[in-house]
Structure formats: C-alpha cells, structure tokens
Image (cartoon, rainbow, N blue to C red):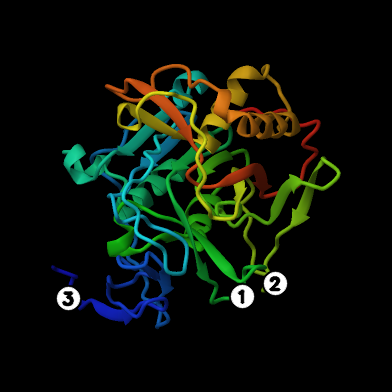
Amino acid sequence: MNMGGVSPSTVRCKHCSTQLTVCPGERAIQCTQCCGVTRIRRRRVQRPAAAPPTTGFPRARGKKRALLIGITYAAGLRPAEGGPQRRQVHEATPLPALRLPQRLHHHAHCWTSSRGADDQKDPFRLPTKDNIRLGMQWLVEGSSEGDSLVFHFSGLGAQVADDDGDELDGYDEAICPMDSFQKGPILDDEINETMVRPLVHGVKLHAVVDACHSATVLDLPFCCNMSRSGSWQWKDESPPSGAYRGTSGGKAMLISGYSDGKAKSSVASAQKPEACATMGAMTHSFITAVEREPQGVTYGRLLTSMKAIMTNSGGCAVQGPIGAGAAARKVANFSGVEEPNLSSSEKFDIYRKAFVL
C-alpha cells in the first residue's frame, strides 16, 4: 500500500495484546479481535488538508444542507467501546433518516452501507473514514449567515482514554466509520474542530447522533439532560484544561442519548428480521417527535416527546418508506439509549426557544 513515503507502524491492542497496523497520522485504532479502541501514543503527525471533493458530493450549496450517514457493520466485526467484547454474529442495520430532508427542505447528501463495499459501486457513497471527513468539511465549508446545517449519524460509537485533559470523565467519545478496524474511529476532538469551530455568526448546526457513548460526541461545552425532578437542566461540560470548544460565532446543537453502551432491542414489527430494514431508536424518536409536534415546538417539549416515544417504542409503527426493497421496518435500540440529551455551544431557555431547523 502506498503511504506517500511513510511506512505504517504497529501497536499492540491494550485490551488483548493483538498486533495492529496503524495508518500514518491516525490517533486511535480499533482491534479486529476484541473490538477495543487503543489510542496511538506517539508524536502527532499533522494530517494533510483534504482536497475539496470533486465527485460524489452535491455541487449545489443552498442555505440548508444535510449530511446523513447510516452504517451496518460486517457480521462478526462489531465495533464497540473499549474492553474485550464477544464477537457478534448479527448486527442491526441502522439506516439514516432518509425522509428527513424532504420534510425539512434541506439539500441532503446521504450515505448508507447495508453490508459493506459490495453494496455500493461508487466509492464516494461509502461511509468510510476518509469520506466522512470530507463530508463534514463539505457540510460547513463556505457557510454564511442564515445557513442551516444538519448532521445525522446512525451507527456505533466508542470511547477511548483522553490524553490531553479536555474530558471531565477522562474519555474521548468517537463515531465508528465502516472501516474503523482499518483506520480507527473519528474522535470528538476532530469532529469539534471540523464542524463546530468553523461556524460563523448566523450559522446554525443541528446534529442528531444515534450511537452509544454519543452524549458529548461534538465536544460542546454545555449539556442538558433530565434531572431527578423531571425537568431538563443545563450542566457545564467545559474541559478542565480550559480549552475552548465553542464556535466562531455560530450555534451548534447536538441531540444524542444517554447510554451505558449495552445494546438493547425494541422492535416495532412482527416480521422476520431478515425481511426488515432497521432504524435506530434515537433516529426513530427524533423523526416521530418532529412529525407529531406542531411547528414552533420548544426544545424542551421535543425532548420530552422523544423520551416518551423511546419508552413506548415497542408499540410504535415506523411510517413511510425507509429503504428500497424493505418489506417491513423495525426499531432497534442498538445503542442502548435510555433517554435523549441536548448539548449546545451556548445555554438557552429550552422551554421558550422554538426548535427550528
């Protein structure tokens, strides 16, 4: 493999000691044996700036843009959070919110991987690590006042020990591309640097991430979750290091979910699993809440509606087309999400501010 004159290095998995090959410049790698994530503790190599995508991405740059990603991982190779894991025989099939752009009038670029590279002949349509990086750049590049951006990821997440003191819990969060075992996950530090920091005044980004360990995956400074009293309250998640994790004047909001990382299943179809397309519980609850609630619904009411839908998802039918040839659909809580969370680049009154994309 041509590495541009730089030889790949190797590192031992910190969980099972398997020898792993690391691509130059990567900061973490995922083990194919135990699925654990190992941080690469070496001199950081500056990743060359990616050239603007010339194919595979929409050329139109409207005021509303969306990047929607859904990934299925190869059977027996389930990316997971750190620590030895049993290898899975079957993985639920998360699909992106394909009817989201039609309802919200966003110009969308969608990636869906159902069983791997054989299902997509166009390499730019695969949710690989390089393509997701390009997609995140495409989403925010050249944005200006009045732009509304949407990022959606439906797949699996991971945690890796923090090495720069910017995480309160000592762990970085990450999303797992389809080639996470070869190139490693995408860490929250990079997601923040690529999609949050460049947002200028008047630009608004909404992200919906349906993955385990996703509550702070955009590294935003404030998190809003439900207290014991049943009200939604803000918590300051600013890093102990004092590093700035906000925008360049714009607004960024992430709707994700609290999860302990243990996969659960909530099915809204009695059909055979092989005949079904599967939607993640976070994705399903978000779309259903947006469709059910009136226009101008507040963030607080939207979160409450999502929580109720998650609780009762076993009786919810998934309406509308999801994928070509899908005979039936089901909702699977593959990320183990228990309730939605909202994180933001700034605090605001969620019971007064209207949810507007």
* Residue at which label 2 appears: 240
Is residue 48 at all visible to an observer of this figure?
yes
User: Within 10 angstroms of label 3, few (less than 14), some, or many (20 or more) residues?
Assistant: few
Q: CA distance from mark 1 to mark 2?
A: 7 Å
Q: Name the mark on residue 117.
A: none
Q: Which residue is mark 1?
A: 165
Q: Are marks 1 and 2 in contact (CB under 8 Å)?
A: yes
Query: Quick check: 50 left or right of 68?
Result: left
Vertical relation: 17 (above or below) 235: below
In the figure, 252 relative to 294: above or below?
Answer: below
Marks 3 and 2, how far apart in space?
38 Å
Q: Secondary structure at mark 3?
A: loop
Nearer-the-camera pick, 218 or 332: 332
**As shown in the figure, which amino acid type bears the numbered disc 1?**
Gly
Q: Residue 152, percent across and down?
A: 47, 39
Residue pictured at 29% horizontal, 54% vertical: 76
Distance from the alpha carbon under mark 1 to that under mark 3: 33 Å
| Kind of residue sitting beneath label 3 | Gly
Q: Earlier in the sequence, mark 1 or mark 3?
A: 3
Circles 1 and 3 in contact, beta carbons < 8 Å:
no
Residue 291, quarter of the rendered image: top right
What residue appears at the point 58 percent right and 29 percent down from the top-left corner? Answer: 313
Circle 1 packing at 10 Å, graded few (<14), some (14-19), many (20+), is some
Label 1, secondary structure: give it: loop
User: Residue tagged by mark 3?
Assistant: 5
Q: Is residue 21 shown left or right of residue 258?
A: left
Name the spot of residue 31 as percent of width and height, x first.
Answer: 34, 68
Dot in front, 1 or 3: 1
Q: Nearer the viewer, residue 331 or 86?
A: 86
User: Which residue ends up furthest to the right in the rendered image?
Assistant: 229
Looking at the image, residue 308 lies above or below residue 167: above
